[in-house]
Image (cartoon, grey):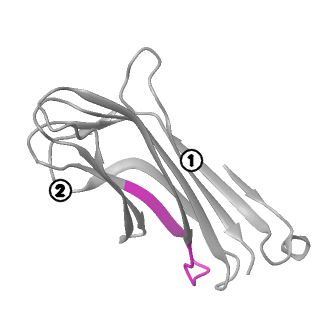
Amino acid sequence: MTRAVNTALAGAGGVLQVVNATYATQTSSSSSTFADTGLTASITPSSVSNKILVFVNVSGIRKLTNNTWCELRLLKNSTVLFNMESSAGRNGSATDNAVGSASTTYLDSPATISATIYKVQFSSANNNAEAIINATGNTGSTSTITLMEIAA
């Protein structure tokens, strides 16, 4: 979903557009190689000087067996912006551990008027057991990403 605002009315610091995406499919990995979670959103800034405020919430984080944990990182197109979580579910044992969620906020300066994709990737740190996002339970869970273009 995208919402646009009249840029003349927004003024510096105003919100020009909002893009929101959700992802509710349980996704797992047993690899320490980062892979896309499925949580992604695209925004096309209206000026090269505007900023993009990114809000991410990854839900239903869980690790199964063995001593592993879930790692999460935020990317812009194919560039890693930062590691948003380095040890979700880590408990130092082989027991199952459900964490809940991990969230972050990031202010980016994309310096472009081309479509820009923000996405989250994850891995199973020790490469020996499943790390899961959007773990299904009684009601399942949904992860979200929201992008806001902020006027310069």
Q: Is residue 15 visible?
A: yes
Badge 1 amino acid? Ala
Tell which circle, 2 or 1, labels the residue nearer the N-terminal end: 1
Q: Disc 2 designates what residue? A: 33
* Identity, as a three-letter code, of the amino acid under mark 2: Thr
134 or 69: nearer the viewer: 69
Q: Which image quadrant is residue 148 in?
A: bottom right
Looking at the picture, does residue 33 appear above or below residue 50? above
State the extent of the magenta-drawn residues as a range. 108-120
Please tell me which residue is depicted at 35% across the width and 29% down the height of the picture: 135
Q: Residues within 10 Å of mark 1 (few under 14, many from 20)?
A: some
x and y, in percent, of residue 46 in the image: 70, 77
> For residue 21, which numbered disc appears in the image?
1
In this rendering, position of residue 150 left or right of residue 57: right
Left or right placement of residue 52 versus residue 32 in this view: right
**Crowding at mark 2 (Cα within 10 Å: few <14, some 14-19, many 20+):** few
Secondary structure state at the residue bearing disc 2:
loop
Asked where in the image residue 53 lies, by quadrant, the reply is bottom right
User: What residue is rendered at 43% in x and 14% in y?
Assistant: 138
Quarter holding the C terminus is bottom right
**Residue 84 image offset from top left, x and y in percent:** 39, 58
Q: Nearer the viewer, mark 2 or mark 1?
A: 2
User: Is 44 included in the stretch rendered in magenta?
Assistant: no
In this rendering, would 16 be left or right of 61? right
Q: What SS does tag 1 mark?
A: strand
